[in-house]
Image (spheres, grey):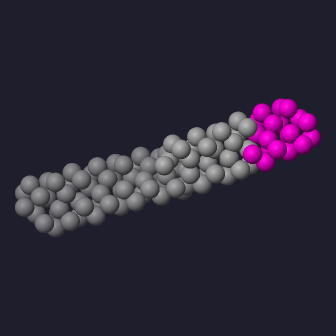
Amino acid sequence: MSDNKSERAEGKFEEIGGAIKKNVGRLIGNEQMEVEGKAKELKGEARQATAKAGERIKGAVEELTGSVKNKVGHLIDNEQMQVEGKVKELTGQARQKANE
């Protein structure tokens, strides 16, 4: 399975290709081509949404594991562990925000 970034890109290309096919079909009066283009466009949009959801899940896991590491570091008075945990927590939050 490809990673989520390439899946999003492939979905975007599929969406654009579908939109082009749909519009060409509309221009030349070919209803079947128009419908096929719309279907391809929607498939591309769905593919992108799925990839974004996967990235949000990864971000939530990063945020949670970072938070745990930060708290454990605090409990055992390990400053490096706290900082690493906080960085991972913030990275996870950023990943989620970027994929809303």
Q: Residue at x 86, y 45 (%)?
A: 72
Dominant SS type (magenta): helix
- Chain part drawn in magenta: 67-85
Q: Residue at x 16, y 54 (%)?
A: 23
* Residue 35 covered by magenta stretch: no
Picture coordinates of residue 25, whole percent (x, y): 13, 58
The N terminus appears in which quarter of the rendering? bottom right
Vertical placement of residue 62 versus 31, above or below: above
Residue extending farthest right: 76
Relative horizontal placement of residue 77, taking residue 28 as reference (left or right): right
Q: Residue at x 53, y 44 (%)?
A: 97
* Residue 70 covered by magenta stretch: yes
Q: Quadrant of residue 18?
A: bottom left
Relative horizontal placement of residue 95, taking residue 69 as reference (left or right): left
Vertical placement of residue 57 versus 35, above or below: above
Q: Nearer the viewer, residue 31 or 96?
A: 96
Picture coordinates of residue 81, whole percent (x, y): 83, 37
Q: Residue at x 55, y 55 (%)?
A: 54
Picture coordinates of residue 91, whole percent (x, y): 64, 39
Q: Nearer the viewer, residue 11 or 80?
A: 80
Vertical placement of residue 41 versus 93, above or below: below
Q: Quadrant of residue 57?
A: bottom right
